[in-house]
Image (tube, grey):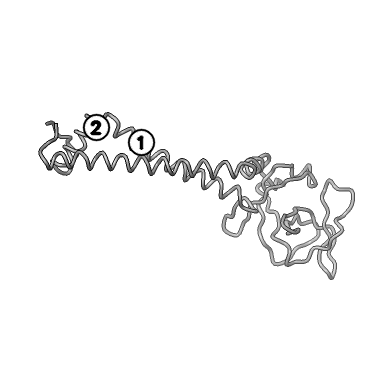
Amino acid sequence: MRCIPECKSKMESVVTYGYCNKSGACLMIRKLAVISKWTAIVILLVYWIGSLPFVGCFGEYRICCIMSGSMEPLIQTGSLVFVKPAQEYAVGDIITYRCGETSVTHRIVKKTEEGYVTKGDANPAPDLEIIRKEHIIGRAAPLWGNTFCLPWAGYIRMVLYDCRIELILTAGGLLLVSLWAEWTDNKGRQAIIGKVKSGKQE
């Protein structure tokens, strides 16, 4: 029997060559296990991103998804905005603040003793609620020049959020396929080893 050069032992050579040569499926099974596992990991990562109230964090920055057109034309619907906490906020700053279970990104137009009055650039009137400092997540940071957002990138997050159930089911199925493929591969290897040890290998 011909040995494969990179095998560590004669037994490993026999098992690898014999199993692959006889069934013709071991490499395909191993590839299936690896591809399924890594695809599932990527899908779970995508699911996690889509489930976050914010798209993500980079150091002190949070990436927020803009779901409305209240700040157009400066910040368009479906854009991503980078927000950074600050010690103080001034009139003219674009801030993101908590509003119930959601977040709002508007501009500060007035500062009062109670907090801040905000307004969307595209809205005709200021917001009714006074925003307290503890509710502010951070101030929108310009990416370059006067650009405060990544246009259209937020739509990806919207799609992920809408498809989160399908993503988790798909990832679960791929993990099961990966486990089955690894179990099948190990079972085939053990069967060949058993035949070699008993002297019954063909």
Mark 2 belongs to which amino acid? Cys
In this view, the residue in front, 104 or 120, is 104
Quarter of the image with the N terminus is top left
Quarter where residue 91 is shown: bottom right
Q: Above or below — where is 99 with respect to 1? A: below
Mark 1 belongs to which amino acid? Lys
Q: In the image, residue 138 lies at what x, y percent?
A: 69, 59
**Most distant residue in the bottom direction:** 113
Q: For residue 20, which numbered disc appears in the image? A: 2
**Mark nearer the N terminus (2 vs 1):** 2
Q: In the image, residue 159 lies at what x, y percent?
A: 64, 40
Quarter of the image with the C terminus is top left
Q: For residue 31, which numbered disc appears in the image? A: 1
Q: In the image, residue 24 lies at what x, y percent?
A: 27, 29
Q: Secondary structure at mark 1?
A: helix
Q: In the image, residue 48 lies at what x, y percent?
A: 56, 50
Residue at image point 89% right, 52% down: 125
Quarter where residue 155 is shown: top right
Residue at image point 47% right, 46% down: 41
Q: Above or below — where is 20 with respect to 61? A: above
Q: Give the CA distance from mark 2 to mark 1.
A: 13 Å
**Most distant residue in the right direction:** 125
Residue at image point 53% right, 43% down: 169
Q: Is residue 201 left or right of residue 89?
A: left
